[in-house]
Image (tube, rainbow, N blue to C red):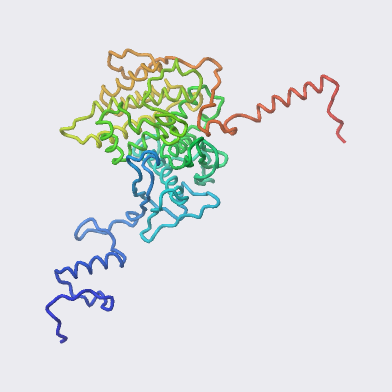
């Protein structure tokens, strides 16, 4: 028999693993690290002797993305794990990357999509990641409820069309905007150089902007008539508000961001925080101190008029107040971590808002419709009376509904609307995001037909009959 030294020998590439004698030494620990790095790991198990975990457990990839946008340096980038199959592009069954001129991003040796910031590849991965997180967040919000047992569809999806949503991070060069297009089945993001500033701003780098536009796509799949401009102003306000609330909900769905918010505000959500500031970098480029919009506002419906952008801030502000109220009610620092409580409160309010939007009328929905649906669902979910009172009171203060703020909410009784749209009021979408201003959501052909009909009538009345047909 071959004699071996009693001293352990370092693992050599010339010695196959099967001939290596394991000993409790530094050399063996190094050998184990080498094997774990170079060889395919075995299937994960739930415990000694347990059956292997099913294969889908291993699906997913890590990505590097902005927590908010490049201007929020306090929290910068974050590494995130996205469960599910993720392919070159990046793309999956529901979301795909389609930017011409940018090579598709491929996973690295570890199967991850971790790229260098300030590059087209990083922007592609970041944009995809936010869209994917937004869709997944809302699908999770409906899991286990009777509202749906299927994936949230895009507006064009049906039994014969399961095409994904395509994202174009650089789809609008030199444009200070972004939009969701139903007819093109895509999201396009602009980039621009602010006046007097040297650096270009890319809207695709903003978690708030990307999630806002994705929210338009999600809501359009649920309520396709709401995006049309012939709805009352409040219906348009619901669409814009859903976008801003989605940015808030997506932030609160991530525990590390909840930790940052608690630390930044000392657990007081009405202190200045990146949670309430929507699209910080874009807002700074326009010379604004609080981002493009501020969710922590005090605007009422009588102050907002018919401008959809202003009206949307009324609903968003009320929901933000509800979040802050419920968080304050649920806080118990001696027993529960503040960040965990904020994360949970965000999940509860997110699910309540999404399901209330689904329950609202398919056409000409009003703020009061959604608020009453929220209260009905809060009763069904057995939420505390204090939470129900907070919902009612905040919307009463915003003049959305009428109610007695010094009494408990009465289940089963819908609240009367407060300030309402005037009969025949037309939406003013001029200050909204690019989505709300696309011609495809206006019945432009009908408007053109009116002018054509007027021309034909004038010609007939003034001796210009149509030519005889050959």
**In this rendering, is residue 173 above or below 444?**
below
Q: Could you tell me residue 334's position as x and y percent?
A: 15, 32
Q: Is residue 196 left or right of residue 465?
A: left
Judging depth in this view, the residue of 410 and 454 nearest the camera is 454
Residue that protrudes farthest toward the left in the picture: 6
Q: Is residue 146 left or right of residue 6?
A: right
| Viewport quadrant of the C terminus | top right
| Viewport quadrant of the N terminus | bottom left
Q: Is residue 31 left or right of residue 168?
A: left
**x 17%, y 72%: residue:** 22
Judging depth in this view, the residue of 184 and 55 nearest the camera is 184
**Tally of marks:** 0
Q: Quadrant of residue 260?
A: top left
Judging depth in this view, the residue of 229 and 256 nearest the camera is 256
Judging depth in this view, the residue of 313 and 358 nearest the camera is 313
Q: Quadrant of residue 339?
A: top left
Q: Could you tell me residue 183's position as x and y percent?
A: 57, 39
**x 41%, y 49%: residue:** 117
Q: Could you tell me residue 294's position as x and y percent?
A: 40, 27
Q: Quadrant of residue 312?
A: top left
**x 56%, y 42%: residue:** 184
**x 31%, y 33%: residue:** 346
Q: Could you tell me residue 16's position as x and y percent?
A: 27, 76
């Amino acid at each position: 028999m071959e004699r071996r030294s009693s001293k352990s020998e370092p693992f050599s590439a010339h010695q196959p693993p099967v001939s290596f004698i394991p000993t409790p030494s530094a050399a063996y620990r190094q050998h184990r690290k080498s094997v774990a790095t170079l060889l395919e790991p075995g299937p994960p198990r739930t415990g000694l002797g347990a059956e292997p975990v099913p294969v889908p457990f291993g699906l997913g990839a890590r990505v590097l993305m902005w927590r908010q946008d490049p201007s929020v340096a306090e929290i910068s980038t974050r590494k995130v794990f996205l469960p599910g199959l993720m392919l070159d592009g990046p793309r999956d069954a529901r979301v795909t990357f389609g930017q011409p001129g940018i090579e598709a991003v491929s996973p690295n040796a570890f199967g991850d999509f971790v790229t260098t910031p300030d590059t087209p590849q990083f922007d592609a991965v970041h944009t995809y990641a936010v869209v994917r997180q937004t869709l997944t967040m809302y699908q999770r919000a409906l899991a286990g409820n009777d509202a749906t047992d299927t994936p949230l569809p895009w507006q064009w999806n049906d039994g014969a069309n399961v095409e994904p949503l395509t994202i174009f991070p650089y789809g609008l060069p030199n444009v200070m905007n972004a939009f969701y297009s139903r007819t093109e089945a895509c999201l396009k993001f602009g980039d621009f150089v602010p006046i007097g500033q040297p650096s270009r701003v890319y809207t695709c780098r903003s978690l708030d902007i990307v999630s806002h536009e994705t929210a338009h796509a999600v809501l359009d799949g649920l309520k396709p008539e709401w995006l049309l401009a012939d709805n009352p102003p409040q219906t348009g306000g619901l669409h814009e508000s859903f976008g801003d609330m989605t940015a808030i909900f997506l932030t609160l769905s991530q525990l590390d961001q909840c930790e940052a918010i608690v630390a930044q505000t000392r657990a007081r959500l009405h202190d200045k925080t990146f949670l309430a500031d929507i699209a910080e970098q874009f807002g700074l480029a326009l010379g604004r101190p609080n981002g493009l919009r501020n969710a922590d506002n005090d605007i009422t419906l009588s102050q907002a008029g018919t401008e959809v952008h202003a009206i949307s801030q009324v609903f968003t502000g009320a929901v933000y107040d509800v979040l802050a109220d419920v968080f304050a009610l649920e806080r118990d620092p001696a027993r529960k971590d503040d960040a965990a409580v904020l994360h949970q409160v965000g999940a509860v309010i997110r699910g309540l808002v999404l399901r209330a939007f689904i329950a609202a009328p398919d056409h000409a929905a009003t703020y009061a419709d959604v608020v009453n649906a929220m209260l009905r669902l809060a009763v069904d979910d057995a939420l505390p009376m204090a939470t129900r009172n907070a919902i009612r009171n905040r919307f009463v203060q915003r003049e959305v509904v009428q109610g007695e703020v010094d009494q408990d909410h009465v289940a089963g009784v819908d609240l009367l609307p407060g300030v309402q749209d005037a009969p025949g009021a037309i939406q003013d979408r001029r200050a909204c995001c690019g989505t709300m201003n696309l011609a495809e959501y206006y019945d432009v052909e009908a408007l053109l037909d009116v002018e054509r009909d007027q021309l034909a009538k004038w010609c007939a009345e003034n001796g210009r009959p149509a030519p005889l047909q050959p």
